[in-house]
Image: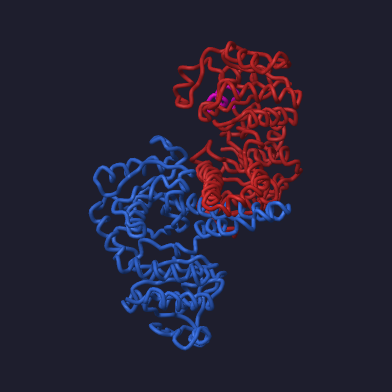
Chain colours: A blue, B red
Amino acid sequence: MKVVVDAMGGDYAPHEIVKGAVIAVQEFGTELILVGNENMIKTELDALGPKSSKNIEIFHTEQVVTMDDLPSQIIRAKRNSSIHEGLRLVKDGSGSAFYSAGNTGAVMAVAKMILKTLPGIDRPAIAAVMPTVKGHTVMCDVGANVDCKVENYIQFAIMASAYASIVMGKERPTVGLMSVGEEDVKGNETTKTVFKQLSELGQRGIINFYGNVEGKDVFRGTSDVIVVDGFAGNVALKVSESAGWFISKMLKDELKSSTLSKIGALFMIPALKRIKKKADHSSYGGAPLLGVNGVCIIGHGSSNSTAVKYSIKMAHELAKQKLNDQIEKAVTVTDSGITS
Amino acid sequence: MKVVVDAMGGDYAPHEIVKGAVIAVQEFGTELILVGNENMIKTELDALGPKSSKNIEIFHTEQVVTMDDLPSQIIRAKRNSSIHEGLRLVKDGSGSAFYSAGNTGAVMAVAKMILKTLPGIDRPAIAAVMPTVKGHTVMCDVGANVDCKVENYIQFAIMASAYASIVMGKERPTVGLMSVGEEDVKGNETTKTVFKQLSELGQRGIINFYGNVEGKDVFRGTSDVIVVDGFAGNVALKVSESAGWFISKMLKDELKSSTLSKIGALFMIPALKRIKKKADHSSYGGAPLLGVNGVCIIGHGSSNSTAVKYSIKMAHELAKQKLNDQIEKAVTVTDSGITS
């Protein structure tokens, strides 16, 4: 069971990617295929010591997708990029999961083209793991689908529920529907219909439907899963990340503002570091693209070796736990009612 | 120029409302009409000292809208509530602005019914002032309209721009459109059309259009105004408030976790208090319901006397600066192109 890693994707590729990959092999015993420019990958591996290439194969590719390439251009002009070749390795069974910290739009488009979607799933969706006071919550979709129909939400609920059961180790994770109030009647025209259909799936025991949740419930951990359209989900994700940045910036500025607070800060460094670690998305690994026929993890462009390491671990785990079998099973039980 | 205050609205009404009202009179010299149960208001005023009722009139009402009342019920069954009577006082010219920290849905519905919308405005919208690293940004809509057409966004842009120019003291505030990426082509089907129309309004000099912004731009203060549909805007607002709560909770827990951090915390208390003040929405006053024919400020249900004081100040300021004249002027210049 090998994880295929796009060595060329991400702001700090290939250095941080290869470094994270080597650490993943050493810490978790994962077997890997690094896809990208062989010379560059070998240089990075050599710099990491004589035993760094243990359990690592290299698949050479010439073409590299940049962060600025448009998905449409990539599909036409870069058919042999590290993203394409990596996903083909998963498609043909050489690898069991794919991970890239590269251009998100490109990975989504190419994954959908090469891996195709699972039976009963119209559109893949991105799930993000958010920290909460209780632990974590899975929010889906966070940007793959900015115009959603009712059936898309239903599929997000089923896919994110299966994903949450694996990453959170809960057999029946609760599923909340993002709305503008917690009462059943709150929502826009689409989410009101979604509410009824999710309630029905809940009554049939297919998901564990909690009901409506609001923006404030994200960090409260009110439900294990939050189903949301990709537009509002993307806004929520980016506002969350940015709120942490804003508060820590204010904190840093204030700590520098007086001798008294500088002294206080010295005492508090360990506590502040623990908070940073708790709120830092690196340790949750990348976000899975749910609904494609194969495991595909998309990392943050700014991923460092720690983020890479945990993403590889997650990719391996999702393949091992057969995430897609669980999604397919739930879709089959739900029957034709959920697809368009 | 009198501000009409709903003495019965809010989780801590009438106590905090009357207290905040008295402070507003004392600090800013505002003249007020308190609407609600006369006995209860008088009891509160008496408790605040012999001169507390200076510049304050009382308008007695029997009916009170609770937080649980549905807007539809209120319109039918509570025609003489403090919200209704207060808004009628603005409608007939006895007062120049209305403020309530009561049931938001009820205030919106009754304000639209009694005050009506401004010419050229289809639907009123709520604007919220958010703290940023640069100062503040005005986000509109944050919950009044969960299903928006293109023309609604355009009207939000014009109204929020006029509001921002008053509260931020900027003649030509920049207007960003909330999207899932900063590139011009990013967005959902509706926001892509909105983008084109806002660009055109920008070229005509009616607004100062910045372009697309993302969730992370809220706290960066990238644009002075952020235009967004009421669903995503409401999610963004509540996620923001909740992120602050989450981080301060983690901080408190960590500060209690060791003697070292307890000592550090003592030194840092002044700095932490300044941050709390900066991020606290109380000092920005309530949120205006833009687009109704009269000034109407809606406060947070949990408003304390400080929030009430600043909301009254803002209500007075918006009436004095003739916010609605500015909106009407911009709508007229934009001509019939913006209304449905």
Query: On the image, which quarter does residue B281 sit in?
Result: top right
Query: Does A50 appear in magenta?
Result: no
Left or right: B256 in relation to A109: right
Which residue occupies the foreground of this view, A335 or A269?
A: A269
Left or right for B176, reference A121: right
Of residues A250 and A227, the one drawn nearer to the viewer in this rendering: A250
> Is B113 within the magenta?
yes
Q: Residue at x 70, y 25 (%)?
A: B23
Main secondary structure along the magenta-highlighted residues: helix
Q: Which one is nearer the viewer's eye here, A174 or A100? A: A174
Camera-nearest residue between A158 and A76: A158
- For residue A227, side relative to residue A16 (left or right): left
Q: Position of residue B25 (x, y in %)?
A: 72, 22
Q: Is residue B137 visible?
A: no
Q: Is residue B303 above or below residue B211?
A: above
Q: Which quadrant: the N terminus of chain A?
A: bottom left
Q: In the image, which residues are magenta?
A: B109-116
Measured as percent of width and height from the top left, residue A306 is found at 49, 69
Indicate the position of residue A327 as horizontal and vertical percent values. Answer: 29, 59
Q: Where is residue B163 shown, x and y percent of the image?
A: 68, 38
Q: Is residue B87 visible?
A: yes
What residue is drawn where x is 75% and y is 28%? B320
Instruction: Count how many numbered circles sit on residues in the image.
Output: 0
User: Which residue shows up at 50% across the image and 80% down it?
Assistant: A63
Q: Residue at x 25, y 47 (%)?
A: A205
